[in-house]
Amino acid sequence: MKCPRCGSEMTVDNHRKYPIEMCYNCGYMEGRNFGENPQGVSNFQHLKGLNFNELVAFMVEGIGVDEDKLSDWLTDIYKEN
């Protein structure tokens, strides 16, 4: 099943009383009323709220680039500023 919010593949989470589909990239859980755009949050606003590892995972899934290359590139940009 594809996530309605970010479009990545959802995973079944069996750690609850009943299994639900969950997106580990953006945090969407099956049955929530987020739709495609929760509370008017744009993709850029969503990215701003992620920690570094979540940001890399979200971008790797969406862009399809190598995770190590993206992580190194983002780290280099951070060191320059």
Image (cartoon, grey):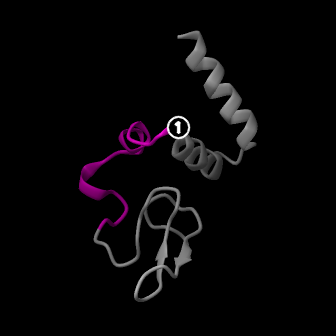
Going 49% across and 58% down the picture, which residue do you hit? 6
Vertical side of 63 occupied by 76: above or below: above
Quadrant housing the N terminus: bottom right
Residue 71 x %, y %: 66, 34
Asked whether residue 46 is drawn in magenta, I would say yes
Check the image and name the residue furthest to the left. Answer: 39
Label 1 Cα crowd, 10 Å radius (few <14 / some 14-19 / many 20+): some
Q: Nearer the viewer, residue 11 or 33?
A: 11
Q: Is residue 48 magenta?
A: yes
Quickly name the residue at label 1: 52
Percent position (x, y) of residue 15? 48, 79
Q: Is residue 2 above or below residue 26?
A: below
Q: Amino acid at mark 1?
A: Phe
The magenta segment is: 34-51
Q: Please, is residue 65 above or below residue 34 in the view? A: above
Q: Pick out the residue farthest to the bottom.
A: 18
Q: Which quadrant of the structure image shows residue 30?
A: bottom left
- Placement of 1 over or under 7, stated as above or below: below
Whether residue 16 sits left or right of residue 37 in the image: it is right
Q: Residue at x 41, y 39 (%)?
A: 44
How many numbered marks, from 0 up? 1
Q: Nearer the viewer, residue 10 or 76?
A: 76
Front-lying residue, 63 or 32: 32
- Quadrant of the rendered image containing residue 42: top left
Q: Is residue 45 left or right of residue 21?
A: left
Residue at the spot 63% in from the left edge and 52% down from the top edge: 61
Q: Position of residue 45 (x, y in %)?
A: 36, 40
Residue 11 x %, y %: 57, 73
Disc 1, SS: helix
